[in-house]
Image (tube, rainbow, N blue to C red):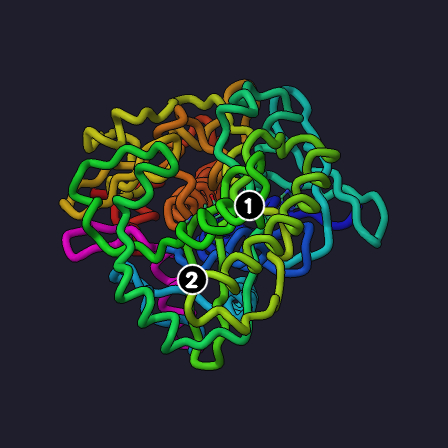
Amino acid sequence: MLCRTDVLVAGGGPGGLAAAVAAARSGARTVLVERHGCFGGVITQTGVETVAWYRRAGTVDLEGIGREFERRAEALDGATPDVQSQSLALDSELFKVVADRMVLEAGVEPLLHCLVTEPIVSGGVVRGVITESKSGRRAILARRVIDATGDADLAVRAGAPCRTLAPDKRLGVTVTFSCSGVDKARFLDHVARSAPTYGDWTGRWYVQTDGKEDRLFSPYLQEPFDRAREDGLVPAEVRGFGGTWGRVTDAGEVTCLNVVVMDGYDAGDVRQLTGAEMEGRRRCLLALEALRRYTPGFERATLRTFGADLGVRDSRAIVGRYELTGDDVRGEARFADAVGIFPEFLDGYGLLVLPTTGRYFQVPYGILVPQGVDNLLVAGRCVSGDPVSHAATRSQLCCAVTGQAAGVAAAVSLRRGCTTGELDVAALQDELRRHGVRLD
Ligand SMILES: Cc1cc2nc3c(=O)[nH]c(=O)nc-3n(C[C@H](O)[C@H](O)[C@H](O)COP(=O)(O)OP(=O)(O)OC[C@H]3O[C@@H](n4cnc5c(N)ncnc54)[C@H](O)[C@@H]3O)c2cc1C
């Protein structure tokens, strides 16, 4: 056995990080286990820095640990204004340190380089997990477990009902990359002159907007890839080029090029994950060559890094006590068991809706609660809902909302001597308010 704890959180992305910090701040002994060498998930491992690119003047937004991610990064000089929104783009490298500090300050025990392989379940209740690491195969006994693996790894192995879409219906996977040697002034001048908008997405990705998005600026690149295809640089059968860039630094680095989207991969299959990483790197080099040839400012750009981990948008989710729907997100749903709010922001499954209007929905506790196994909660992108609602709940800051709620719920259930399934929601809401979470 590795240790005993009150709360074990598996996975240290925005969902798991928020869950662990929240549980510890609510007084529970907490262990946060992550398979890679840093916390932050897609932010730090894939290098996606735009945590709140939806935020506009009219947005009514969450309050809680997600906002703290931005404030803490800014205080460390690890965030700059996002080019498209009223938010901050994080420096994904420095965010590793932000996450370390938040974990240590809250009193969470961190475990990096440790894979959680399965839950220990008896009598329909989760009692801990099995881990694999350089320390060997070890159990961690825990009174509450939070599955923040992104893929609902623990929930499915505990026998909870889960759903996956057919591979051709899922959101594509991405290998991101960053460049050095970009002439910033020349590139930004080109961007200003070409004035890309979210409307440019609609023809390419079969995305439907509300119309109000179409004329807003988007840091979107398509033309270089179209020209590369015309000139035979990109083979006709290779689809999915086009997307966004992140920060451009004064040193001539473009930090997150999210321009290679690959459909049809199953992130639950180790051979397909391997294939996606390798094919993604191949396509990133084609994309870089297209940028060099056809994008002013990129002529002398060189590869700096590939994202350290494949970016997975869509894999497995639980079928929870409640299934959030696209209508809930679009209809400003209100719930008696609300544990947070999130703006009406949809990005995925053919929809792009930006929260320019002040509309928002409440996030219900029921989407964190799996069926058939107690004292297990999920947080992050594997919460329960239909695909359209997933286009909202998968956002990094919505993952922080569900993470914070799961962490506080685990701690409050321990204090009150009940299971997470039996938890009195009023007590959970009181504690969340005490943490500064916005519930309505
Ligand atoms: C290319 C790409 C671009 C995106 N762009 C944006 C954007 O601009 N803005 C936005 O808000 N969202 C964006 N998203 C979506 C968002 O980043 C994710 O949905 C979000 O990070 C999910 O958070 P999470 O905590 O659920 O999971 P992840 O961020 O995936 O974190 C899961 C963590 O768990 C760890 N883990 C997994 N399994 C185990 C295990 N068995 N044992 C131990 N550790 C484990 C992983 O290593 C990882 O650290 C993007 C996603 C991708 C892939």
Q: Residue furthest front?
A: 231
Q: Residue at x 72, y 45 (%)?
A: 115
* Ligand 1 closer than 8 Å to label 1 CB: yes
**Which residue bears the numbered disc 1?**
174
Image coords of residue 43 (percent x, y)? 51, 56
Mark 2 / mark 1, whichever is N-terminal: 1
Note whether 41 is above or below 300 in the view shown.
above
Q: How many marks?
A: 2
Amino acid on which disc 1 is placed: Thr
Q: Is residue 29 among what the camera can see?
A: no
Q: Residue at x 69, y 50 (%)?
A: 35
The answer to which image quadrant residue 398 occupies is top left
Q: Residue at x 44, y 77 (%)?
A: 183
| Residue at disc 2, secondary structure | loop
**Which residue bears the numbered disc 2?**
246
Image coords of residue 332 (percent x, y)? 19, 33
Asked if residue 13 lies in the magenta stretch, the reply is no
Q: Residues within 10 Å of mark 1 (few under 14, many from 20)?
A: many
The magenta region covers: 52-76
Q: Quadrant of the N terminus?
A: top right
Q: Residues within 10 Å of mark 2 (few under 14, many from 20)?
A: many
